[in-house]
Image (tube, grey):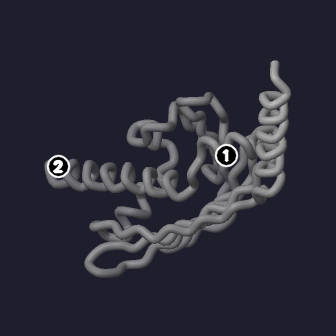
Amino acid sequence: MSLVFVAVVIVMAGLAIAVVLLVPATTSTTVEIHFDAPVQAVWRVYTDFESQPNWRSDIDQVEVTDDKTAWTETLKSSGIVVRFRILERTPSSRLVLQTGADGKFEGRFVAEFREQRGGTTGVFTEETTVLGVAPKVMRILFFNQRKFIEEFATEAKAEIKRRESSEVRQ
């Protein structure tokens, strides 16, 4: 091996380590999304945790506690189990969740809904702290909070429409 190649590898490794160390462990993303549906319909979909494997493409399984204040979601792609616990629930307007996956991350998700422009505006804030270097690298390479919130909303919109059309047929 040439010394130039070794030097390049050392510099690249050093840069990778610097990026990992300099990227903050905690990130926060807020996204505002409009739904063409009444606030109660949006609320029902966002708080019907048990049905999510039926309409969310990234969820394999959901297990809800008997008191319905906590649940776990098993992700299809990785098998990671994510825990959720309701911290605050104000029907049709505000939902605050504590989230986490053992040894990987912990966080908080806030969803606020208000009737606006003939539909509902949702403001979603996700704050996540990764636990350790490997989860930080995985987040940098593979996870986009904004995209996750937007994809969830897109699938929720489809589920709201499916439920509305199902109610019309009945």
Q: Please give the residue where the numbered disc 2 appears in the rendered image.
A: 170
Marks 1 and 2, the one that precedes in the sequence: 1
Q: Which residue is rendered at x = 59% and y = 46% of the image?
A: 143
Does residue 105 lie above or below 107 as drawn? above
Count up the numbered dots.
Answer: 2
Q: Please give the residue where the numbered disc 1 appears in the rendered image.
A: 139
Q: Quadrant of residue 107?
A: bottom right
Can residue 102 be seen?
Answer: no
Q: Amino acid at mark 2?
A: Gln
Report x, y in % for residue 150: 44, 57
Of 100 and 168, the residue lying toward us: 100
Q: Residues within 10 Å of mark 2 (few under 14, many from 20)?
A: few
Report x, y in % for residue 45: 41, 55
Q: Nearer the viewer, mark 1 or mark 2?
A: 1
Report x, y in % for residue 16: 77, 43
* Residue 90, label in figure: none
Q: Which residue is rendered at x = 80% and y = 57% of the image?
A: 22
Q: Amino acid at mark 1?
A: Arg
Disc 1 element: helix
Alpha carbon separation for disc pair 1 and 2: 44 Å
Q: Quadrant of residue 5?
A: top right
Left/right of residue 3 with respect to residue 158 in the rendered view: right
Q: Which residue is rendered at x = 62% and y = 62% of the image?
A: 126
Left/right of residue 93 with respect to residue 138 in the rendered view: left
Of 98 and 87, the residue lying toward us: 98
Report x, y in % for residue 47: 49, 56
Q: Which residue is rendered at x = 68% and y = 40% of the image?
A: 138
